[in-house]
Amino acid sequence: MNDSSWGAPTGAGQAGYWGPDDRGPVQGADPAGPAYDAPQAQQTRPMPIVPDGPVYGGDQDDDRGAARLSGPLFREEPSQARPHHTPLAQPFQAVQQNPEPMPDASQPAPPPQKKSAGRDLTSAIGVGVGLGVVIVASLFVVKAVFVGVVAVAVVVGLWELTKRLEERKGIRAPLVPLAVGGAAMVVAGYVRGAEGAWVAMALTALAVLVWRMTEPPEDYLRDVTAGVFAAFYVPFLATFVTMMLTADDGPWRVLTFLLLTVVSDTGAYAIGWRFGRTKLAPRISPGKTREGLLGAVSFAMVAGALCMQFLIDDGSWWQGLLLGLAVAASATLGDLGESMIKRDLGIKDMGSLLPGHGGIMDRLDSLLPTAPVVWLLLVLFVGSG
């Protein structure tokens, strides 16, 4: 062992031992360097090997430390030499004096945490039932009132979408032409059908281009592109709901559309939460599973067969099976599409207007892309009348 690692004092006639008082440099002693005087160098001996484990006790334990044991070697005058039997005092101890207690192996493991739904189910159910009552009441009492409900939902959805785009990405899609054109688009779809919806969509896009010209030209292309996208994504897709309403059995068609979408989402949630293991699209929506998709398809097909058989004029159960399959696919894609938008924006919900649900757009995500699918299949199966 090298003496310099211990910082031990040495001197004539010493064997490298030191006493309790040799804890620092001796007053008046000459510091020793790498080389010693020849007579003194012959009197030094190697440091004895100290066995492992603590060799000190009593009050001496409180006076040890790394700072005291480090530093250069010191030497004593020959007159200060001590006999060889002087006890070894307080070498550095690397053993931890107060080790942390080991965990008790006999303690029971904490109980596994239960699965969480991720939202306040009580609030979500209450808000869902309230919205359902308003929609059904307006749907079967006065059709125009239901058109107004759709228009209000579209305007609020546009407000949420444009606000999040500006907050998270700095994109300034003009809200005023989008809101006015979106409401007009919904009404035009109800009054003039698909032709009216397309004309209103074109005029809304033109209004977005012109409105944005009143501001500086920086990021003009980005802002108007986002505006045209918002016009197509929210109000134009919503016009297919009001176009369903124009048929003789229009309220039942809209009710079928709403029921199948809700049942698809419910089946995906129930089966995925209970049996979900395999991720469906982990990079887009980590919570969705393939088992949940199978639940959505199964629930929607059964509900579709029942709705087409008992609610739709001249409908049959096998058409309902195909309709349910299509609804499950479009609703899932719509949900993934909005999840992609929210992931790009770095947000969980589009808004907080509906407790337990998020915002209006968080409820329209699966409804909007499903509306044209249901409208088209119903026209093919039973006609537009």
Image: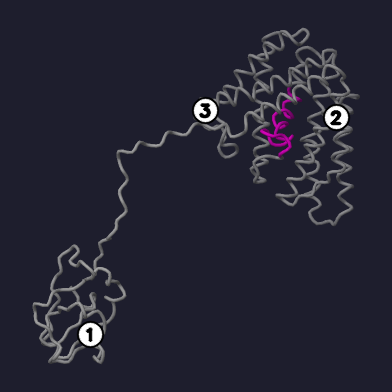
Kindly identify the residue that appears in the image at 42 percent across and 34 percent down: 111
Disc 3 element: loop
Residue density around tag 1, few if under 14, some if 14–19, many if 20 or more, within 10 Å: some
Kindly identify the residue that appears in the image at 72 percent across and 28 percent down: 367
Q: Quadrant of the N terminus?
A: bottom left
Rendering quarter of residue 245: top right
* Chain-order first, disc 2 or disc 1: 1
* Chain-order first, disc 3 or disc 1: 1
- Specify the label residue 186 is tagged with: 2
Rendered location of residue 359, percent (x, y): 72, 36
Disc 2 element: helix
Q: Nearer the viewer, residue 298 or 351?
A: 351
Q: Amino acid at mark 2?
A: Val
Q: Which stretch appears magenta? A: 352-373
Q: Amino acid at mark 3?
A: Gly
Residue density around tag 2, few if under 14, some if 14–19, many if 20 or more, within 10 Å: many
Kindly identify the residue that appears in the image at 85 percent across and 17 percent down: 141
Rendered location of residue 29, percent (x, y): 24, 91
Q: Quadrant of the C terminus?
A: top right
Spatial CA distance of label 2 from label 1 is 95 Å
Q: Left or right: 250 with respect to 88? A: right
Residue carrying label 1: 74
Kindly identify the residue that appears in the image at 72 percent across and 34 percent down: 354
Query: Do callouts 3 and 1 mark residues in contact (Cβ within 8 Å)?
Result: no
Q: Left or right: 114 with respect to 59? A: right
Determine if the magenta segment contains residue 311: no
32, above or below 213, in the image: below
Spatial CA distance of label 3 from label 1 is 73 Å
Q: Nearer the viewer, residue 157 or 379?
A: 157
Disc 1 element: loop
